[in-house]
Amino acid sequence: MKTLIVDDHPLYREGLANLLQQIFPDACVEQAGDVHTALDVLARGGGTDLILLDLKLPGLDGRTALPDLRQLYPAVPVVIVSAEDDTATIRACIDAGASGYIPKAARREVLAAALTVVADGGVYLPPALRQLSSAPATMAWTPHTPPLTQREREVLAGVCAGEANKVIARRLDISEATVRAHLGSVFRALGVANRTQAALVARQLGILDGKSDSST
């Protein structure tokens, strides 16, 4: 997993990079102290799999940069790693396309679990928003919920069929990174945090059999 850490504190970047390589021995970690440097790194290519983004950065801050990163690199999940832990900030970042939000005070085990969820195409919610995990039992499909694209429906169909990401990627002739990106969009649209909940909501609402009001 090739990861780009974007944080303006060198000691924290180094510590996080070392921790990542302890958790994921095969990880390749690059670092940037601001958004502009991060964009230069991403522009060079090399197949970045994950971006860990701080919010308080010099120049262009992480909160402002998040939507741009999601638009420029839709197949690369962005996880916010920040000292801020208020519910409004976390919710705003998830709504803006973040695939997770990890408080800087989180323990190593939490970081490992969060990144494993994201690597599988999920969205990691910290305890402050964990109540969203009960959404399938209470949520309703409304006109305000973003509709799913045809490709997102195809990926969701694979999830409902129990297919792994690599199987979905092979069937649709797309990369696993693209599958993960589509899954992140599906999870945010449905207000869920994992594949099991997405499949449950899809079946409850008839999203894949024409019973929902979403468009292609």
Image (tube, helix red, strand yellow):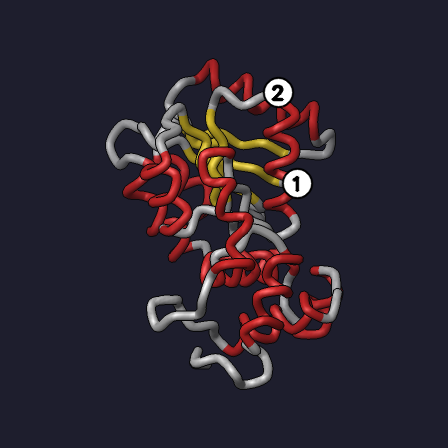
Q: Residue at x 32, y 43 (%)?
A: 65
- Above or below — where is 204 with respect to 49? below
Q: How many marks?
A: 2
Q: Residue at x 49, y 20 (%)?
A: 105
Q: Percent x, y for residue 56?
A: 31, 28
**Please, what is the three-letter code of the amino acid marked with disc 2?**
Asn
- Above or below — where is 173 with respect to 210? above
Local crowd size for mark 1, using a 10 Å CA cut-off: few (<14), some (14–19), many (≥20): some
Q: Residue tagged by mark 2?
A: 18
Q: Nearer the viewer, mark 1 or mark 2?
A: 1
Q: Residue at x 40, y 23 (%)?
A: 83
Q: Residue at x 45, y 34 (%)?
A: 128
Q: Percent x, y for residue 191?
A: 47, 57
**Please, what is the three-letter code of the amino acid marked with disc 1?**
Thr
Residue at the far top in the pictured view: 11
Q: Nearer the viewer, residue 158 or 131?
A: 131
Measure the alpha-carbon separation of dots 1 and 2: 17 Å
Q: Percent x, y for residue 162?
A: 75, 65
> What secondary structure is found at the residue carrying circle 1?
helix
Q: Quadrant of the N terminus?
A: top right
| The label number, if any, that marks residue 116 in the structure image | 1
Q: Is residue 112 visible?
A: yes
